[in-house]
Image: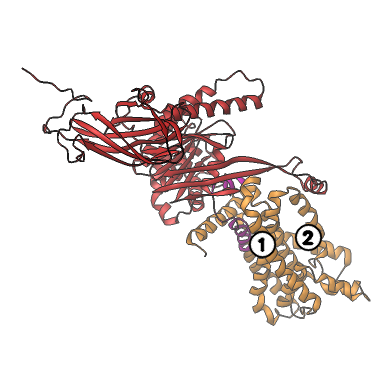
Amino acid sequence: MIKQQNIELMRALITRELKSRYKGSALGLLWSILTPLFMAVIYVYFFRMLIGRGVPTEGIIIGVFAWQFTVYTLNTGMMCVSGNANIIKKVPFPRALLPLSVTCSGLIDFMLSLVVQYVLIGFMLSLKGVFFSQLIWMLPFIVIVHTLYNFSLALFYSALNVYYRDTQHLVGVLCSAWFFISPIMYDLDFVRSKAAGNEWIADLFMLNPLAIIMTGYRAVMLPGVTFPWSYYSLAGLIITFASMIISWIVFSKLKKNFADYV
Amino acid sequence: MIAIEAQNLGKAYKLRHGSGSLYGTMLDTLQRKKTEEFWAVRHLNFQIKKGSTVGIIGHNGSGKSSTLGLTTGTISPSEGCVKTNGRISALLELGAGFHAELTGRENVFLNAALMGIAREDIQRKMDAIIDFSGLHEFIDQPVKNYSSGMYIRLGFAVATEIDPDILLVDEVLAVGDIEFQTKSLERMRKFKDKGKTILFVSHDLGAIEQFCDEVILLDHASLIDRGDPQWIISHYSKTMMIEEAHDEAHLAERRKQILEETANKRKLNQTTQNILDEVPDKPEGLHKHEHGSKALEFTNVEIVDQDDLDIKEALDPSSVKVKINYRANLDLEEVVFGFAIKSEKGQFIFGSNSALEGQEFKNIKRGDASITLELTNALPYGNFILSLSAHSADHKTQYHRQEDYYPFNVTSSKASIKYEGEFYVANTWS
């Protein structure tokens, strides 16, 4: 099923992705760590200015790093078919390798940033005299779900963008909304405290796959954070997997006419 | 063996009148506008034998590139199918997969991976690729710094070095300097010698003519004609000179009309007499193929001498008899039979047909029958090839034509003597 030549092609495409992204920049791959780091610093700093003490700094760092991975695969992945018109038109190869290679190169970046994140959060937790959650061994599983979900986003929007170029503009707008309705700069406790009396609002948040993933990361890394198991979070998990399957079906259906429309 | 086979191949594009935007599509759907279909190619049937070099010509928009795209597999057919046998490498827009930020070497790996070549394989061929492209000192530079010539040289080197079974070439030899053009033509020729199949699309009719064994003429999405390059090209180029039409649409219409006319004319003109005028001596002029409506078809052909002895066995035959069994699949008013003989080198020796000889074959009834062609032997010792044809009296329909189909030999008791010349003229000295 997975042919040797497809693996070679994946390797070449990922190399291309990584090399072309940082070619000519002095810091190179370091940017994959620096970008989320700077963003985390900015968010934490301004949040403190706005809200004062009590900002979940570790949670924001986890959220921003994970968001970077998603937003990268979404934005780059969305363009990966329409932006490679030249090879789509000239060479027959498994089309799914394009979004897959984008996801994989995003994953490589994310893994690097995860190391930095681990050190950083470990340091901050030790200042408070605590250590990582005992569930930290489950981190790889969250990463796998997160990666698969990102891959499905890349599949879905890359296919859609071939047919409707509006997609790329629409996604830009939706992305900024998504950033705010996902628990990235806040956590669900914050939502619950704000929506006192209307607990169901916090429950609805869990229908968002990113909320599942973000909360999952925090639950396995930070001590004292638990994953809020409920029918809603279960539904959110099902939505996450269902959207992966739907994306795959959509991509498979649309891919055969890519060369006509790119 | 067949390298490429197209069966009722067709590709339709939907013409979108709106902007192609989400809004436009929604609007169209709401207003129930029907999308129009445009057939880039349709009802395409052809077979390309392994080892042959076939050119595809036609006006812009006649479906050439779609045909190549369908053969490569990048575009999926809307109708029918195309089967290919062996690894395909497409020289369509050389260096198409190159990424500007990567170096030449990195791009070679990427390009090879796209074509499904193992990294080790391409590693081994790297030196040859660099040599051919002549990019020695530039191979580790990003290709964005390359000149367009360097770009193309590298693209060509990769595409041909990976040793495909089928090579698809689209308008690429027109680029590059003379030296590169010569080099690439030479490489294509080597491919040909190795028995690889080449499908060649170009507007450069000269290159097609000198390079291809056969030409396919496309116009308005359909296959108009197929056959000897010289023939088809000479007629095709005439249509380029039409000036009588005023508007584009009319011009295209007129061109198609003329193309079809000439194609039909060619088919019926392929009686032996015309071959004499049209096909000059070509050492590589042998090309076995057959075509025709098969309203009447040759079923069995035997070549014997005057005593009905197989010509292989015969010594010094005084005549060569061709016993033709045929089957008429329809009742036919009149049939003209023709023949042609070529030397083993493809040199045309002689040809004629029943109408030219004043013989009539009328009221052919449906069913099997036979006919004998008797030739007074004037051939010198050697090998020859016979072509046969049957067509309608008004020259409109070619029933069956078997070109360069039946090889036979003439053995002489003076076998050791190799006569110069195409005929043996009986001579005695006294």
Q: Residues within 10 Å of mark 1 (few under 14, many from 20)?
A: few
Q: CA distance from mark 1 to mark 2?
A: 39 Å
Query: Which one is earlier in the sequence, the residue at label 1 or at label 2?
Result: 2
Same subunit, labels 1 and 2: the answer reads yes
Which residue is pictured at 82% across the width and 59% down the height?
A177
Image quadrant where one finds the C terminus of chain B:
top left
Q: Which chain letter matches label 1? A: A
Task: Evaluate whether residue B407 shows in this view.
Answer: yes
Expressed as whole percent of the image width and height from the top left, the position of residue A246 reads 70, 64
Q: Name the outermost residue toward the right.
A: A197
Q: Which mark is residue A42?
A: 2
State which mark lies toward you, 1 or 2.
1
Quickly name the residue at label 1.
Answer: A249
Q: Which residues are magenta?
A: A84-108
* Letter of the chain shown orange in the rendering: A
Q: Which chain letter matches label 2? A: A
